[in-house]
Image (cartoon, coloured by chain):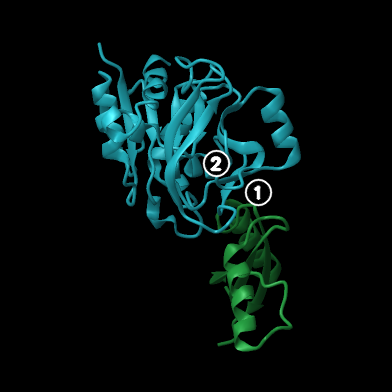
Chain colours: A green, B cyan
Amino acid sequence: MPTFEARVDVAHLPGIADPAGATVERSLPALGYTNVSQVHMGKTVRLHVDAPDAASAQLQVEEMCEKLLANPVIESYTVTVSELVA
Amino acid sequence: MSKRVGVVLFPGTNCEQDVVWAVEQLGGAPEILWHGDATTKGVDSVVVPGGFAHGDYLRTGAIARFSPVMTAVSEFAAAGGPVVGICNGFQVLTEAQLLPGALQKNAGSKFLCRTVELRVETTTTALTNQAELGQVLRIPINHFEGNYVCDADTLARLRAEDRIVVRYTENPNGSLDDIAGICNEGRNVVGLMPHPERASDAILGSADGVVMLRSLLAA
């Protein structure tokens, strides 16, 4: 069975506080980057999953997001799957 | 016979001894429920205390929800057993979907550790049945993620069904509708961010938490 690498990006839903992002945004002008806005901090989860094909790998990882990797009340997620080439 | 109160202990829980002490002071019989054992040991009520269960990895309460004891706690709650989640315990109960909504980071990005005033908004729950409606209680908070959030429909239901148990008189953390604690439909599961066990004796600065713990023992 082929192995797929999945990358899960978890982000705050709009309107949910992102104090880490806000802090980074306030710090960047000190380095001269005064043209920065909309800094958002999220989480990335990378994992390998054995599955018959990319579609079923994608589906499984989305299930994992619903059950554990993200909290749909406050977070959104995107899943990207690619086959690992030996 | 004194009421047996199960106190859940996850790796990273750090308020269980405070709860044990407070329950004992009130004549209850506390019993630690280890997270790896899928049983509530026949206790009369369950407290999920504060701390950093499973290190709060991923999200607060996210991993704790899958501890074997939570299956037993969910069954206990479904059968009408009184369950109270305090602070991290509240976060665990939302992740376990025993209570709606979620706790996000405090507005203002500050960790908050101080005594606040709570107003009792309903007296028909496992945690407030001995309190008076509108009673103001001085109880400590100690959290970074206590900012309650839920969608508009959920908030409308919580209000319509009188499920907002306690509100902050002065909102410290940005919580939606000043919510400090809520209950489930059955009113037997309550979660709140403030720590009643830390206000269980005058020597601690307040004994206002006693009425809550007495309510739990009476539930």
Name the residue beneath numbered marker 1.
A73
Q: Amino acid under label 2?
A: Thr
Q: Give coordinates of residue A3: x percent, y percent.
A: 57, 75
Q: Is residue B173 above or below residue A8?
A: above
- Asked which secondary structure carries label 2, the reply is helix
Please, which chain is the residue tagged with disc 2 on? B
Q: Amino acid under label 1?
A: Val
In the image: residue B218, left or right of residue A60: left
In the image: residue A15, left or right of residue B65: right
Can residue B114 be seen by looking at this rendering?
yes
Q: Is residue A35 above or below residue B79?
A: below
Name the residue beneath numbered marker 2.
B94
Give the residue displayed 67% in from the left and 68% down from the top: A79
Q: Give coordinates of residue B194: x percent, y percent.
A: 45, 38
Q: Give coordinates of residue A2: x percent, y percent.
A: 59, 76
Q: Tell me, for residue B23, which label it has, or none.
A: none
Give the residue displayed 70% in from the left and 57% down from the top: A13
In this rendered view, identify the residue nearer to me: A25 or B183: A25
Give the residue displayed 67% in from the left and 29% down from the top: B158
Check the picture and name the quadrant holding the N terminus of chain B: top left
The answer to whether marks 2 and 1 mark residues whose Cβ atoms lie closer than 8 Å is yes
Give the residue displayed 64% in from the left and 74% down from the top: A25
- Mark 2 vs mark 1, CA separation in Å: 10 Å
Q: Is residue B105 above or below residue A48?
A: above
